[in-house]
Amino acid sequence: GRGRYYAYSTKLAEEIETRRHLFQQITRALSEDQFEAYLQPQIFTDTGAIYGCEVLARWRHPERGIVPPATFIAAAEEAGLVDQIDRLMIVKGLDLLEEFLAKGIDLPSISVNASPQTLRDPHLTDRLLQDVHERLLTPDRLTVEVLESTLIENDDDVALRTIEQLAAAGFSVVMDDFGTGYASMSNLSRLRLSGIKLDQSLIKPVPNPRADSIISALVTLAASLEMKVVAEGVETDQHFETVRRLGCHVVQGYGVSRPMPADTFQNWYADYCGSQARLRTGSGRRA
């Protein structure tokens, strides 16, 4: 009546109920500490030395086992819970870094993801400074990765000011998934970034003349802006050799290692450092 109508379908009702149930599960997972920090190593292309690790959220579901972020991040964003997951990974990542350093594991830095919701916390920089100082760390040990899809609408946007504050405080800020959005160039000129992380969709086709040219152009652009370039999604020897030749500073991907829990990382670190020690000086290639 009154010129209005409502549509209903069993499929739509099922989707809504599934989403509601997932929201409840994520809320419970946060309260019961079911989210774990997995680490994916990053290495320098020229020396093979360890650059750092990205901290990635994994949900250890009591029935389904390890659940990857593709299954829950979008739902967490919709439910307004993604900033809590971000916060948890920051704390757990810094705790692991402190633990590793105490054990003599020389991990130079960790990188954490910051959703648009997290970046719009006006107190984020103060929180992170307190986090690193409590662990007797310095801000340069922590890199904050921001999605290219994060929309900065105007110069007064809280997220834009937060990025400026993070950079001024000594944290590295890197634009993640670079090459997938529509505002890349404008964001590079407006944001105080220390680097860009090339999306794996740019890396997957290489070696390929057109793909190589795009990466080379982005490396040149980054160099002119004094930014480092991280190549994500490096899975094969050809990927590694190509991005190294094109000037990418750091690589990350299955070709180096899959994401892993902390205890597995410690074993990987020992094996990797041992293999690096056996390489000829200056070979610049990972084991």
Image: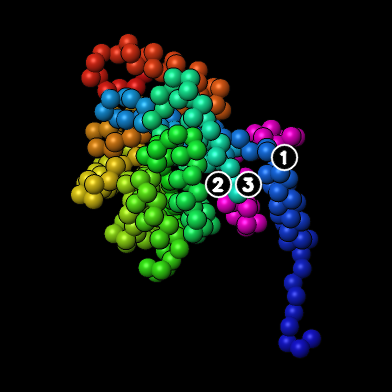
Residue under the image location 68 percent in, 38 percent down: 33
Mark 1–mark 3 CB contact (< 8 Å):
no
**Three-letter amino acid code of the residue under disc 1:** Glu
The residue where tag 2 is placed is 86
The C terminus lies in quadrant: top left
Mark closer to the observer (2, 3): 2
- Could you tell me the amino acid type at mark 3? Phe
SS of the residue at dot 2?
Answer: helix
Whether residue 62 can be seen here:
yes
Mark 2 or mark 1, earlier in chain: 1
Q: Kindly identify the residue that appears in the image at 27 percent across and 32 percent down.
A: 244
Labels 2 and 3: the sequence-earlier one = 3
187, above or below 173, in the image: below
Query: In 3D space, how far apart are the residues under numbered discs 2 and 1 (Cα atoms)?
Result: 16 Å
**Residue 19 pos. (x, y %):** 71, 54
Mark 3 — residue? 72
Horizontal placement of 241 versus 8: left or right? Answer: left
Query: Dot 2, crowdedness within 10 Å: few (<14), some or many (≥20)?
Result: some
Q: What is the CA distance from the residue labelled 1 to the residue labelled 3?
A: 16 Å
Q: Amino acid at mark 2?
A: Asp
> Does 269 appear above or below 25?
above
Going 43% across and 35% down the picture, which residue do you hit? Answer: 137
Residue 120 image offset from top left, x and y in percent = 50, 59
User: Position of 12 compared to 237: left or right?
Assistant: right
The answer to whether any part of residue 202 appears in the image is no
Name the quadrant containing residue 71.
Answer: top right
**What residue range appears in magenta?**
59-83
- Find out whether residue 81 is within the magenta segment: yes
Which residue is label 1 attached to? 32
The quarter of the picture where residue 204 lies is top left
Of the residues under marks 1 and 3, which one precedes in the sequence?
1
